[in-house]
Image (tube, rainbow, N blue to C red):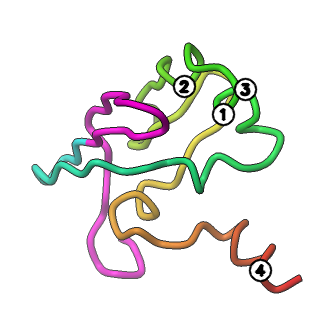
Amino acid sequence: MTQLGKRVRVEKAEPLVEFRMRVFFEDGTVKEIDLEKYLRGPIFEPVRKNRAVFQNVQIEGGTIAWPNGADIDPDVLYYDLTPAWMEKAEKI
């Protein structure tokens, strides 16, 4: 369960233009999300700099992921939350 009471899982994802992704959740919700703000740090550098890598998105463990190990928490995607790493960076 998430902090908001609902277990969130990604079922499918379709890359769109720029850093936008259409994300399909198991509960039937579909969201078009601009991932640009999440693609920060060394793990996301290949995803951010190479369109082919961005488009090579996969579903692993119920969320979107890339072959280099980068992923984004499904709760962040579903509830438009601030990722933990961004909260830490804002406090510095």
**Residue beneath label 2, please?**
54
Which corner quadrant holds the N terminus? bottom left
Give the magenta part as a residue range. 1-23
Q: Nearer the viewer, residue 28 or 62?
A: 28
Give the Cα separation between the discs numbered 3 and 2: 8 Å
**Residue beneath label 3, please?**
46
Marks 1 and 3: in contact by CB < 8 Å? yes
In the picture, the disc for residue 90 is 4
Q: Identify the element where label 1 is drawn.
A: helix
Give the Cα separation between the discs numbered 1 and 4: 21 Å
Picture residue at 56% right of the left edge, 13% below the top: 52
The part of the image, by quadrant, that contains residue 61 is top left
Three-letter residue code for mark 1: Arg
Q: Nearer the viewer, residue 37 or 64?
A: 37
* Residue 66 pos. (x, y %): 57, 27
Three-letter residue code for mark 2: Phe
The part of the image, by quadrant, that contains residue 42 is top right
In the picture, the disc for residue 75 is none
Which numbered disc, 3 or 2, marks the residue that appears first in the sequence? 3
Three-letter residue code for mark 4: Glu
Which numbered disc, 2 or 1, marks the residue that appears first in the sequence? 1
**Residue beneath label 1, please?**
48
